Every structure is written in structure tokens, then in C-alpha cells.
């Protein structure tokens, strides 16, 4: 069972306290009417399905209730880091120095 | 004392005899015996019949690796455990075991005829033979195969045992209490850390238990660990290693006790989170692959050593050894020193270690180098072996009553592999060993490959001058897989070891290939012309050894399987004799039968009461979310399809919630309590989901909105009063609210007091009648209910349940999200397009409603159905066609979503979704069922009071 670092509670907690919430950094368009049908379809349905580093959302549903983002390797199932919602997408594992909102 | 028990040897207590029954026969062993050692002490070698060929089988090993000796253990009614290895059953008084997979008896098994027919049962036999006709698979093949080929029988009775679980948090977990594990624990014991040492055996010590020279050290070490506060658990198997230092372990608490004295839980599941883990899981000896290597009496050399030193049992009186590896010699020396006759040591290697040769010579043992066993003899036990010099046909026979195999050692890397640890090929060991690093986890001792390899040869199968097609050399004893089967799989084109494994079933039995994986790999590699590391190993998965469902389920069964949510009025409904149903996790009153009423009669009475007088309904399970803040109206406006900003405080509105894909997710009435406060209701089952969805948008899409969301589902009891006389029931008890239709019209909201307690009052209806939903603090719910019930007696008040609620709302065509909708219905499909704010620029799902697919005229739309036969109630879920008796496959154009007998209309009614349904109103369609095809007429999904006149009573 994974340990997941909640960036709001700032501590690792067992996986069963969390719910998965899909791919991260897919912002809802400000004006959906401006999107073509194809663009809207992409927003709705098309996902990365990454092998390796994957940006995804989790919710500490049986804890603080907050949604946050994570970088997880889908091959090894290990978390590289978690960070607060609204923080920019981290770059490569070794180059990114941004604010994690609580380092993993 | 039996002829095979060796006085003065072993850790057993011969002064304490233990009586047990084996296949109904009374036998005696000693305290400290396993069933296996007790059987050997009684001279019993035949302990089972093999899976496929029903060949007689004996003990191969002395521990969890045992593939043959599987027993059914009977501990009383409902306490039958199948497939338990005799080597792990601790002997106790009243132990009752039966052998498996034989009929009529172990000694005389008719199923053994399959052995004679074995040329008909090659690898992949099932896949090749039982292909068709398909129907015969269920009626003929599978039942027959299950009878003939199989292991133990699953019990039929419910397991009466209790199981428990606990969480453990430690700094260091050590798995395996052999020498390496104990040394690791000793090294850590002075650190002040929380250290836990677990071992699957009844005694800590691992292979030291078979080495009397180390017993004093072992006793001293265990005392030191105890003094240092190290938690030592025996009978505890680490079944799986998972992420981030998590290990699951099962502790067996009572199976070793006589059933009459066993109290408390049977097993305890430990969920262990460890900062560091040391795997000291040891190694398992490999058997050798040669003709008839499965005859009872053929066993691992290390097992014979364990039986000798730990249990004081001789596995035979004249023992032969077949070795490819130095480690077999020590066993021969130990046996000889114990006075057991050694028939011969057959070694496949030409050049032997001079010191071993000298020792064998000193003990007078016959050593036959550069030769191999090419066959065994005997009916139900080995009586002799045939051997041949390598490359020669000059065979020789030797009499013996046991044959020991020493084929080298395989590190027990299962847990390391569970954690996705890498493995590397160790040429000296001829086995895979842990390689690289793993977060938190290290390996030590034999598990890490720290085995003195001695000198050995790791052959795939022993050479034989005989035609390979003429004999069976077993690789997997539990699944009856031979070297020939594996070679056949390769000839038939299988290349991947994972495919070969599945085609031959090598390593797929309950022992998970503990003794067969590596030999199978070697044979496959040989046939493929590759090396073992090129072919690679199959994947190990948890559990390490078979695990009871009880241990995994723990207390999560029966009433504790999941919580039953009950409203505060539940006890009243129970006292009234309500019949309940489960809705999400709630227990809800379905109907309230009187005297001998069945459900139809009760529902008819309840429906009439609501339509003509007044009914009372516990709606407390409705999801409730308090939406508060300056931006509350803006937030709801973005979430729901409806416009909310213009809704005045004191008014309610039906709210429709879509997913971003435009499909209906939930619905419910919301009241505006104040400019910055809404009381939103959801469906009973959708409450948590809707709150989660709202939180998601609020936190991540619109964090700028100043809104707070709070679940208030359980803060309020909700009492629905529905019917023309509903107002009369509440009026005498309400303070501070003008209940007149003018002051409190349909879809109005007011706050006041009822029966002296605070009340949120909704004038709403899910029945089509005049209706009120009285929300009071949950703690007062039952008292208010009882007061209104007493008041209602003058008006003939009737309690009704969810079934009547369903019928009444269906008569009005009100949908239930999740019953009439299935995640593919848009508001327009459901006929509630009026709930979509036409002037709104955005809300969740709005953009999707403009996608071309959402506008097609043949989308499935909600309609009503009226059967030609007014008494026939359609099956919910039944498919609808427009051409009866059309050739198969008949195009299906929709299905029935809700269907009831309507007491109000005196006939059946149904709701359905039908392609282009609204354009078909008045048409005849057909619902084919098994017995007959029913004609139905499409109608509006509204069967009663079209004008809505009754809403005002």
C-alpha cells in the first residue's frame, strides 16, 4: 500500500485515505463555446496514458479533503512528488526546482 | 516407539504421545511433530495422489515447499481446510486429516487409470481437446475434469471462525528467523528501535533447527532478543511485500491446538509498515529431474536432514542419494552417523572433492561418480533405483527404501520480487538472486545468495540413455508437469517462459512452483537453445503461501461487511413491521404491510392513502449540502443547469446536475435560505459523489469563488407529508409559518418551528400531491415524526415506503437518476430540457449539449409504455423492438427503466428509453420475453394529473 504525501497536511498518509482524480493540468476552458467540437472532445476525453512520469490529481478524501497534484511513475508506481493544486507543472525530475507546496 | 523413530534425537517430546487420525486410521506421534514427521515415524510414505495422473505420491520436502502431501484438515462443522501441506500441520490431539484426490481409497485409486492413458494427456490437453461443442464444456467436460483432476474439496458450510487484524508500525521488520534473520535482529536489538522478527514456522530458527550443533547458540540468541524487546512472532507468514515498506503477514493462532481447547480468533492479519525491511527468507533445495522421480520415498536431501535432526525420524533404513551438488554429502554423512544405512551416493560429476571422497570412505559409503539415476522402482514406495554411468547403457540396480535428491539451492526471492526487485543470474548457484537496490528493503543470508555454493552442476534434467518419450520425469509435482510437457510446448512454438508456464501449468499450483520454477526454466532453456538468464523467470506474486479468505476478510463480514446507515426514524419503522431495502448504504423502509398483506397489497393501500388522504414518508436519506458564501449563487449557477441568481430567498428550485460530458449526474431540490445560503438536496446514493464533484470544481477550477460546502445529510431528519390532507397534519404543530397556499405556494421554503423545534419547511412534491418536507434537527426527528403520526390519526394518515414512493413518482413521470438514466441521457433525452437555463452562457456540461451527437433525432428518449394487457407488468431492463419476430440479431431500440402496477390507474405503467421515442408516441412496439412477446403503446411519460392541479391539494 502506497504512502502518499499530502501537500496540505504535509505528511505521508496511507493510500486508503486518498482518491484518484484523473490526469492533472487539464484546465477547464474559460469559454467553452470558443472551442470547436474537436477541441472540446480533446478536453473531455483525450488523456496522456503515460508510461513513466505521469501528472495526476489525487484527493485526500478521508483526510483534509483537498485536491492536489502528483508526479507518479506509472511503471514503478512510485511518487516523485506531490504539490498543491494551482502550482505549475514540474519539469524533468532532476531539473525542476519549483515550489512543491510541501516536498514529498 | 516406531521403527523409524530415532531415540534421543530431534526437538520432539517422545514422552508426550499425540493421538491423531489419518484417513480414519488411529496413529500416534509425539509433541513437536508435524503431521509429515509423524507419518514418516509411522512408516507411512504414501500420502497423496497426483493432480492429473493420480500417481502415488510421498513427501518431497519438510516445509512450505511441499508439493505432494496436501491434506484436508477437519476441525469440526464448517472448519474443513483443504490443501494443507502435511509438513506445516502441527500435530495435536484429535487432529483429523484426510488425503485428497483419490477414490475409493489412497491405496487403491481408480483414477490412477489416467496414468495408463497418459499419452492422451499432453501439455495443453484441455485447450486442445475440449474445444467443442461449447455446451458440453459446462455439462460434461468441466464437471468431469473437476472430479478427476483436482485437489481438495472446498467446504460448503459458512466458516464459523473469527479472524482479526492489526496494524503494526516498526522501524525494522525482519522476515525469516533463521541464522541470518536472527543475526540481523541481534545487530539491531541494541539500537532502541522497534524491531519485529517474524517466521512462518512454529519455532524460530529456520534451518538451525535441523543443526543440533547450533541449538545452544539459537537458544541464547532468542533469549537476548526477548530481553531486548524485539517482537518475535512465530507461525506468522509474510504473504506479500508492497510499496513503501508495507508487508502483509498472517499469524496462525489456533490451528495448532486441539479444536476443543482453541479459543479466540483463528488467524490474525498483520498490516506492517516498516521503515526498513530485511528479507532473510532463506533458500529451498531443488529436486532433480529424472524418470519416475515422483515415487514415494524420493525426497529432498535437506528434508531428510530436517526429519533426522529436528524430528528424530529416519526417512528410510537404506537410503540412496542422487546428487549434482556438494551439499548432499553432509546429509549422507549425518544419516550414516545416525546409524542409517546408505545404499549409495550417486554423483553426476566425474571429479569429486577429495575431502568428501575421504569422508565417505571413512564412513564406508559407496560413492558412484559420473553416474545418474535413470529410474526408480516400487509400487507405492520406492524399493530400488536404476542408475547408469553418464553416456553408458550399462545400467545397474540398487535396492533402497528412500532416494534423496540434492540439486542445489534456490534463494527464496518471492518477497523481493513482490516489491519489483530486480533479479540477477548467479552462475555458481545456478539460480536468480536479488540484484540492485530497493527502497527500504535489503536481503541477507541465503535469500541474498549468500550460500556456500560448494561445487555443483545445475543440469536441466538428468541425462538418460532411455527414449525421453518412454518415461515421465516430473518438473512440477503438484500440477503433474513433466520435462516432456515443457519440451512439447517449446516444439509447439511457445517461446516466452510466461506462455510456457500457462500452457503447461508449470508452477501454477498452490505451491507456486517453489520446487519447480527453476527446473522448468532450465528445461525450457535447454529446449529453446538458450541460457536460463536469457529466458528469464516468471513473475512471483502474492501470496507467498496459500492464505485463507478469512484472514483477508477479517471482521469485514456479515453485519460488519459495510456499515448500515439508519435514519432516526428507522426504529419506529422497524416497530411498525416495515419491510426494508438497501439503498446505497442506507436501510430504508420499502413498505409497511398490515396483517397478511403482500407487497402489492400494501403498496396499493399506501398509494391510495397518498392520493386520497395523506401519507407520511421518511425522506431523511436525501443528500443535503449547505452551500454558503457571497458567491454561493454564482457557484450553483456554474454547477447546475438551472439559473439560480434570480431565485429569491424563500423559494425552491429543481436542480439538474450534468457531468462535463453533458449527461445527467444527479438532481434534487435546492432552497435559497438567504442571499448567501442554499440548502441543496441530492439523490440518496449521490450525496457523497455530488459533494466531491462540487469540491473538485470549487477547489481546482474556481478557487476564486468564496463558497463553503458542508454535508448536512445526517444533521436533518426529513419527514415528507404528501396528500390532499398534508397541511392539516402539520398545521397544529407549526409556529411562525403561514401555511396558506398564498403565503407558501408550491416550491416555497420557510423557516419556523414544529413541535417546538427549529424547522426548515419545503413545500415540494415527489408524488404530484400537495406536499411538505419537514426538516428538523436529527436528534428531534423521531419525536416530531411520532407527534405528526399521532396528529395524523384523525386524518387516516398512512406511513409509506420507498416502493410506494417509486410508484407515485412514476405515475407523474418524475425520473430517478440512476434508474431511468444511466449516464448516457441528456436533459433533453430525459424530457426535462426545461430545467436547462437557456440564457446561461456556461455551466458544467453545457458545451457538450451542443455536440452533434447530442442533437441527433434518434437519441434514446424517455417515454411511457402502456401494455396491451393492463395486468402485465413489464420487466425493468427488458429490451424493446419495433419489429417482432425479426431475424436474429433483432435490432433493439430501447429498454424499460421503471415498471409498476399503478393502483391509481388500475393498470400497469412503465417508463422506458426508446430511440427517437417522442416521435413514436402512439405507435405500437414490442417487448419480447421468454414466454411471449408483449405489445406496448408508446405514451407521454406522464400518466396522472397532467395539469398538475393536485399539487395544491
Image (tube, coloured by chain):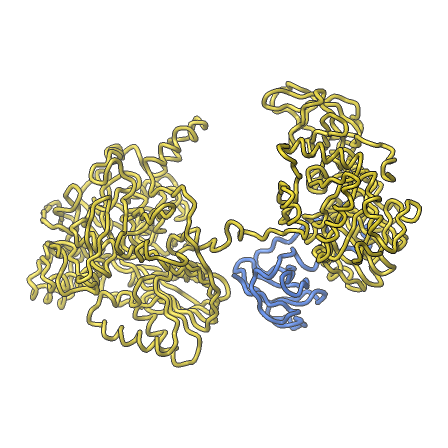
Location of residue B254 by image quarter: bottom left
Location of residue B581 by image quarter: top right
Q: Is residue B849 above or below residue B220?
A: above
Q: Nearer the viewer, residue B51 or B83?
A: B83
Residue B218 rendering spot, x and y as whole percentages: 27, 73
**In screen coordinates, is B5 left or right of B114?**
left
Chain letter corresponding to the colour blue: A
Q: Is residue B865 above or below residue B36?
A: above
Residue B392 rendering spot, x and y as whole percentages: 13, 47
Q: Is residue B847 visible?
A: no
The residue drawn where x is 53% and y is 50% is B559
Where the N terminus of chain B falls, by quadrant?
A: bottom left
**In screen coordinates, is B586 left or right of B416?**
right
The residue drawn where x is 67% and y is 71% is A101
Q: Nearer the viewer, residue B617 or B387?
A: B617
Where the C terminus of chain B falls, by quadrant?
A: top right
Chain letter corresponding to the colour yellow: B
Amino acid at each position: 500500500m502506497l504512502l502518499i504525501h499530502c501537500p496540505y497536511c504535509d505528511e505521508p498518509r496511507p493510500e486508503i485515505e486518498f482518491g484518484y482524480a484523473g490526469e492533472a493540468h487539464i484546465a477547464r476552458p474559460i469559454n467553452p463555446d470558443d472551442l470547436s467540437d474537436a477541441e472540446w472532445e480533446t478536453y473531455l476525453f483525450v488523456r496522456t496514458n503515460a508510461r513513466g512520469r505521469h501528472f495526476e490529481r489525487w484527493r485526500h478524501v478521508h483526510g483534509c479533503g483537498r485536491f492536489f497534484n502528483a508526479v507518479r511513475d506509472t511503471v514503478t508506481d512510485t511518487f516523485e512528488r506531490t504539490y498543491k493544486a494551482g502550482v505549475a507543472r514540474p519539469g524533468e525530475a532532476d531539473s525542476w526546482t519549483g515550489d512543491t507546496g510541501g516536498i514529498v | 516407539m516406531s521403527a523409524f523413530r530415532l531415540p534421543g534425537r530431534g526437538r520432539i517430546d517422545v514422552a508426550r504421545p499425540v493421538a491423531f487420525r489419518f484417513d480414519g486410521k488411529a496413529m500416534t506421534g509425539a509433541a513437536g511433530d508435524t503431521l509429515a514427521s509423524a507419518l514418516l515415524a509411522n512408516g507411512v510414505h504414501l500420502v497423496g495422489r497426483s493432480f492429473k495422473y493420480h500417481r502415488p505420491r510421498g513427501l518431497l520436502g519438510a516445509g512450505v515447499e511441499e508439493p505432494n502431501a496436501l491434506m484436508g484438515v477437519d476441525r469440526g462443522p464448517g472448519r474443513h481446510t483443504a490443501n494443507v501441506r502435511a509438513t506445516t500441520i502441527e500435530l495435536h490431539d484429535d487432529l483429523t486429516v484426510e488425503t485428497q484426490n483419490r477414490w475409493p481409497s489412497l491405496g487403491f485409486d481408480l483414477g490412477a487409470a489416467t496414468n495408463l492413458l497418459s499419452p492422451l494427456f499432453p501439455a495443453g490437453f484441455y485447450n486442445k481437446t475440449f474445444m467443442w461443442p461449447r455446451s458440453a464444456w459446462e455439462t460434461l467436460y468441466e464437471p468431469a475434469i473437476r472430479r478427476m483432476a483436482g485437489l481438495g474439496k472446498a467446504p460448503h458450510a459458512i466458516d464459523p471462525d473469527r479472524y482479526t487484524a492489526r496494524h503494526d508500525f516498526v522501524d525494522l521488520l525482519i522476515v525469516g528467523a533463521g541464522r541470518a534473520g536472527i543475526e540481523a535482529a541481534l545487530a539491531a536489538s541494541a539500537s532502541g528501535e522497534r524491531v519485529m522478527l517474524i517466521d512462518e514456522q512454529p519455532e524460530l530458527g529456520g534451518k538451525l533447527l535441523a543443526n543440533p550443533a547450533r541449538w545452544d547458540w539459537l537458544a541464547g540468541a532468542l533469549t537476548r532478543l526477548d530481553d531486548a524487546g524485539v517482537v518475535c512472532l512465530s507461525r506468522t507468514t509474510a504473504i506479500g511485500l508492497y510499496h513503501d515498506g508495507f508487508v502483509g503477514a498472517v499469524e496462525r493462532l489456533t490451528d495448532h491446538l486441539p479444536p476443543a481447547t482453541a479459543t479466540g480468533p483463528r488467524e490474525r492479519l498483520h498490516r506492517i509498515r516498516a521503515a526498513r525491511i530485511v528479507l532473510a527468507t532463506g533458500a529451498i533445495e531443488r529436486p532433480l529431474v529424472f524418470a519416475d522421480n515422483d515415487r514415494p520415498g524420493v525426497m529432498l536431501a535437506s528434508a531428510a536432514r530436517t526429519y533426522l535432526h529436528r524430528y528424530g525420524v529416519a526417512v528410510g533404513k537404506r537410503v540412496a542419494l542422487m546428487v549434482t551438488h556438494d551439499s548432499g554429502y553432509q546429509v549422507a554423512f549425518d544419516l550414516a552417523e545416525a546409524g542409517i544405512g546408505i545404499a549409495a551416493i550417486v554423483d553426476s560429476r566425474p571429479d569429486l572433492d577429495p575431502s568428501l571422497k575421504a569422508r565417505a570412505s571413512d564412513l564406508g559409503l559407496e560413492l558412484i561418480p559420473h553416474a545418474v539415476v535413470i529410474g526408480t522402482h516400487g509400487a507405492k514406495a520406492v524399493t530400488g533405483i536404476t542408475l547408469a554411468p553418464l553416456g553408458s547403457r550399462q545400467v545397474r540396480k540398487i535396492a533402497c527404501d528412500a532416494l534423496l535428491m540434492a540439486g542445489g539451492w534456490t534463494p527464496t526471492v518471492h518477497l523481493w520480487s513482490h516489491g519489483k526487485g530486480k533479479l540477477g543470474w548467479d552462475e555458481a548457484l545456478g539460480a536468480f538472486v536479488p540484484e540492485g537496490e530497493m527502497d527500504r528493503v535489503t536481503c541477507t543470508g541465503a535469500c541474498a545468495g549468500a550460500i556456500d555454493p560448494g561445487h555443483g552442476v545445475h543440469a536441466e534434467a538428468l541425462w538418460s540413455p532411455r527414449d525421453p518419450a518412454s518415461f515421465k520425469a516430473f518438473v512440477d509435482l503438484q500440477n503433474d508437469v513433466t520435462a516432456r510437457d515443457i519440451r512439447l510446448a517449446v516444439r509447439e512454438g511457445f517461446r516466452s517462459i510466461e506462455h510456457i508456464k500457462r500452457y503447461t501449468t508449470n508452477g501454477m499450483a498452490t505451491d507456486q512452483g517453489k520446487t519447480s520454477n527453476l527446473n522448468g526454466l532450465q528445461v525450457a532453456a535447454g529446449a529453446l537453445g538458450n541460457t536460463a538468464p536469457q529466458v528469464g523467470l516468471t513473475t512471483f506474486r502474492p501470496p507467498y503461501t496459500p492464505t485463507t479468505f478469512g484472514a483477508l476478510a477479517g471482521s469485514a463480514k456479515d453485519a460488519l461487511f459495510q456499515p448500515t446507515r439508519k435514519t432516526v426514524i428507522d426504529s419506529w419503522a422497524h416497530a411498525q413491521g416495515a419491510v426494508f431495502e438497501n439503498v446505497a448504504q442506507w436501510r430504508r423502509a420499502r413498505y409497511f404491510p398490515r396483517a397478511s398483506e403482500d407487497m402489492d397489497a400494501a403498496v396499493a393501500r399506501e398509494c391510495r392513502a397518498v392520493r386520497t388522504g395523506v401519507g407520511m414518508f421518511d425522506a431523511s436519506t436525501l443528500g443535503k449540502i449547505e452551500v454558503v458564501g457571497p458567491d454561493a449563487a454564482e457557484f450553483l449557477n456554474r454547477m447546475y443547469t438551472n439559473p439560480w441568481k434570480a431565485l429569491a430567498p424563500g423559494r425552491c428550485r429543481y436542480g439538474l446536475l450534468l457531468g462535463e460530458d453533458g449527461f445527467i449526474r444527479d438532481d434534487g431540490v435546492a432552497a435559497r435560505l438567504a442571499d448567501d445560503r442554499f440548502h441543496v438536496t441530492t439523490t440518496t446514493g449521490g450525496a457523497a459523489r455530488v459533494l466531491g464533484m462540487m469540491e473538485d470544481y470549487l477547489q481546482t477550477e474556481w478557487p476564486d469563488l468564496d463558497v463553503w460546502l458542508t454535508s448536512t445529510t445526517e444533521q436533518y431528519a426529513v419527514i415528507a407529508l404528501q396528500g390532499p390532507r398534508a397541511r392539516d397534519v402539520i398545521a397544529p404543530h407549526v409556529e411562525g409559518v403561514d401555511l396558506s397556499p398564498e403565503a407558501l405556494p408550491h416550491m416555497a421554503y420557510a423557516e419556523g418551528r414544529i413541535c417546538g423545534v427549529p424547522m426548515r419547511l419545503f413545500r415540494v412534491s415527489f408524488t404530484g400531491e400537495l406536499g411538505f418536507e419537514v426538516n428538523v434537527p436529527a436528534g428531534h426527528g423521531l419525536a416530531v415524526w411520532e407527534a405528526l403520526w399521532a396528529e395524523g390519526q384523525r386524518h387516516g394518515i398512512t406511513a409509506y415506503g420507498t416502493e410506494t414512493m417509486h410508484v407515485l413518482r412514476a405515475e407523474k413521470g418524475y425520473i430517478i437518476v440512476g434508474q431511468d438514466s444511466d449516464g448516457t441521457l441528456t436533459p433533453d433525452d430525459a424530457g426535462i430540457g426545461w430545467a436547462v437555463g437557456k440564457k446561461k452562457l456556461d455551466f458544467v456540461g453545457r458545451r457538450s449539449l451542443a455536440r452533434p451527437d447530442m442533437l441527433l433525432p434518434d437519441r434514446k428518449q424517455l417515454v411511457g409504455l402502456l401494455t396491451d394487457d393492463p395486468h402485465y407488468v413489464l420487466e425493468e431492463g427488458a429490451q424493446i423492438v419495433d419489429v417482432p419476430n425479426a431475424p436474429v440479431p433483432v435490432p433493439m431500440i430501447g429498454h424499460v427503466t421503471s415498471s409498476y402496477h399503478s393502483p391509481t390507474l388500475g393498470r400497469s405503467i412503465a417508463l422506458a428509453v426508446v430511440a427517437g421515442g417522442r416521435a413514436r408516441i402512439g405507435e405500437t412496439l414490442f417487448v419480447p420475453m421468454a414466454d411471449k412477446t408483449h405489445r406496448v403503446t408508446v405514451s407521454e411519460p406522464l400518466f396522472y394529473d397532467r395539469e398538475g392541479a393536485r399539487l395544491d391539494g
